[in-house]
Image: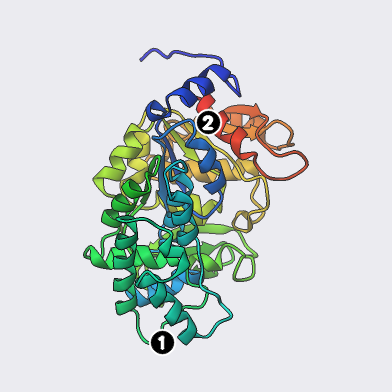
Amino acid sequence: MPSIWRKIIIPDAIRIGRSQKMPELGPRILFFSGGSALNKMSRHLKRYTHNSIHLVTPFDSGGSSAKLRAEFNMPAVGDLRSRLMALADETVLGQPDVYDLFNYRLNPELDNDTLRLELKALEIGEHPLISKITPPLRELIQTQLTITNQSISADFNLAGASIGNLIIAGGYLNNGQKIDPIVFLFSRLVKVLGEVKTITDTSHHLVAKLENGHVLVGQHKMTGKECSPISSKIKEVYLTDNQHEPRPVITRVSEDRRSMIREADLICYPPGSFYSSVLINLVPDGVTQAILENPNPKVYIPNLGHDPEQFEMSLLEQVNRLIQCVNKACPENGSLGALDFLLIDEKQSYQGLEEIEALGISIIRADIAEENVNKYHDQKLAEALISLL
């Protein structure tokens, strides 16, 4: 099949201007992600497209998510909640009040009896955070909180609990332990300018095998935030349904997710925890097949700051591991179909670029980072992605 080539300009004022005028017709940029790394960038991206797709990980095992997962045997919803709020239409009347409520956490210093009373005040509409929200959204939120409050055990520890997570948990329980119905409902009510879904709706846990032979069970043991950073390279990651006997399980991505992946205009492997936020999304059966069936461009944006999960990994090793994960069923493909572009900041110094180009990957240098800080400039990064299409 003949190819059509064009010169890529970043930032491309014409493409950016066109997208700003008609974001409802903007490109379908699909992100495999998790955590908070993309939330600020997503708030800028929605100015240019209302069609971005965010497939987030539901395997978080730390913080308040861990308590809810243990209580209800449910997927983690913290990353889902934060991305929904990042993409919510900020021009909708009352949206800041919803944002404040969903991001509110109960005081970790207060005793559980006091926190129970505060949760009850939210449930019955007497808390100032919920009294600001207008019907029918207020009643919907109260219904989900009632279900959660009635379902949690008497000794459930509410210290530091995310109210947004508790609301989504109620919706999960209220819809036959399915996450998509409540996400769909809230997405419409707060007018989420894009699509946000968990990669699966299963309650699985992440397992990492290290090169030194150690096995880590749980995402929180890999990121270096709640536990000591790893001291050996990660050899393999997989999913399990048993934290005590972490045997691999096969989980399959649903057809609607596969269609989203196949039909995306651009697939982005973004910054974030390399294994627990990005590569783990590629593990469910059907994901990599859908990537390879999509003829459109794929781009990798490496981390600027330190990622404990990338222990002693060079940029070339990161690229090779990404390609290996996508092409696990067809290793003879090389980078073909798995990765087309590496987007890097023009001010940074990188090693191994010639070897990466030898893999058939085009390297794009652009001004996309903050000055004197190992951090991406959120607006510039959003505009760079729009410029690729």
Residue drawn at (50%, 36%), measured in percent from left and top?
45
Question: Which amino acid does the dot numbered 2 rest on?
Answer: Leu
Where 258 falls versus 25 (above or below)? below
Colouring rule applied to residues: rainbow
- Location of residue 138 by image quarter: bottom left
Where 130 falls versus 359 (above or below)? below
Left or right, 372 with respect to 323, comes to right
Question: 94 or 219, which lies in front?
Answer: 94
Q: Farthest residue to the right: give it.
A: 372
Of pointers 1 and 2, the one earlier in the residue sequence: 1
- Residue designated by label 2: 385
Q: How far across and down, in percent of the image, does residue 249 sit? A: 33, 63
Q: How far across and down, in percent of the image, does residue 61 sit? A: 47, 68
Residue 248 visible to an observer of this rendering: no
Q: Residue 155 carries which label?
A: 1
Question: 223 or 336, which lies in front?
Answer: 223
Where 375 falls versus 123 (above or below)? above
Q: Which of marks 1 and 2 is in front?
A: 1
Quadrant including the N terminus: top left
Left or right, 10 with respect to 76, comes to right
- Location of residue 70 by image quarter: bottom left
Left or right, 325 with respect to 384, comes to left
Question: 100 or 235, which lies in front?
Answer: 100
Residue drawn at (65%, 28%), measured in percent from left and top?
365
